[in-house]
Image: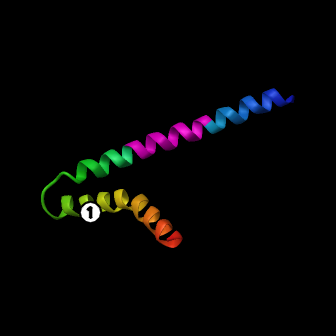
């Protein structure tokens, strides 16, 4: 096979993996978000989980900044 054919087949597989992972992430995130709006302990649990994932990028940035300063 020539290089272009290998590139086309590799791109097809990479796009398939990328699209499927984004669809799975969308479904999982929407499910957790929907469960987070309920009242009671289920909603509170999933709302806390959402808040942890929202905080993580900020926490990593603060740790790196604290290391430099």
Q: Nearer the viewer, residue 60 or 47?
A: 60
Quarter-of-image position of residue 5: top right
The relative height of residue 20 versus residue 39 in the rendered view (above or below) is above
Residue 29: x and y in percent read 36, 48
Residue sitting at x 73%, y 29%: 8
Q: Nearer the viewer, residue 51 or 24?
A: 51
The relative height of residue 31 versus residue 42 in the rendered view (above or below) is above
- Tell me the residue that label 1 is attached to: 48
Q: Quadrant of the N terminus?
A: top right
Residue sitting at x 44%, y 44%: 24
Q: Outermost residue, left direction?
A: 39
Q: Residues within 10 Å of mark 1 (few under 14, many from 20)?
A: few
In the image, the segment drawn in magenta is: 15-26
In this image, 19 relative to 50: left or right? right
Q: Outermost residue, right direction?
A: 1
In this image, 22 relative to 9: left or right? left
Residue 7: x and y in percent read 76, 32
């Amino acid at each position: 096979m020539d290089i272009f054919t290998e590139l086309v087949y590799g791109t097809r597989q990479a796009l398939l993996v990328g699209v499927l992972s984004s669809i799975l992430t969308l479904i999982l995130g929407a499910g957790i978000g929907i469960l987070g709006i309920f009242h009671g302990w289920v909603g509170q649990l999933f709302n806390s989980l959402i808040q942890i994932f929202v905080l993580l990028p900020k926490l990593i940035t603060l740790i790196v900044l604290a290391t430099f300063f």
